[in-house]
Amino acid sequence: MAFWESRAFYDSFMARSHDRLAAAQVGTFKNGQVRLFEHELDVKVGFRPVFSDADVLRLAYCQVRPDRVDHYKLMQEKVWNPAMAGSPGMLRGLLGRAPGEEFLVLSLWQSAAERGKYRPERLERLALRAQMAADIAGVTGDVVDLEPSWTV
């Protein structure tokens, strides 16, 4: 995962450095995929890509039905964002959008124990309230334990 200060910096990197770095990494990974997500909405507070205060990162990759994008974004703002912002231990997050109907919800947490307080039964109630089944064509995600020595 990488965060860029601007699209211009990203484009400059791709034009000047990417191929050389990619050639040096041949054979070190399989099936790499890249998607660019533009910032749509902050979760809780203004997002900043600093990970030193977080132990856990939660990612949810959502494929939204084309006719439900506006509703999905509204529910992120009116239902999911307040619920996550009110959860103990939730630091900050963001909603990003790729071209089309792809969204990424990222949240940073103080610890796995704090994130664990965001209980499945609460998630089910929120999903019903937000009409998630009608909005989402597919969702995948994971909880990632952050390793401080891997951040740059």
Image (cartoon, rainbow, N blue to C red):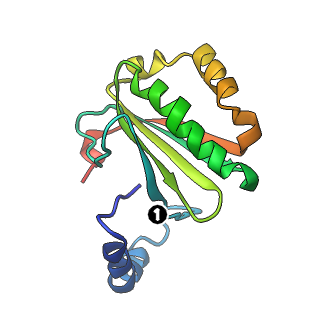
Task: Name which residue type carries label 1.
Answer: Thr
| Towards the viewer: 60 or 70 | 70
Q: Is residue 125 above or below residue 49?
A: above
| Towards the viewer: 72 or 97 | 72
Percent x, y of residue 63: 67, 50
Percent x, y of residue 79: 55, 30
Percent x, y of residue 47: 32, 45
Q: Quadrant of residue 122?
A: top right
Residue at numbered disc 1 = 28
**Helix or strand or loop: what does disc 1 sit on?**
loop
Name the residue at 41% across, 55% down: 1
Locate the C terminus by quadrant.
Answer: bottom left
Q: Is residue 76 above or below residue 9?
A: above
Q: Outermost residue toward the bottom?
A: 16
Name the residue at 40% across, 21% down: 86
Name the residue at 42% across, 37% down: 107
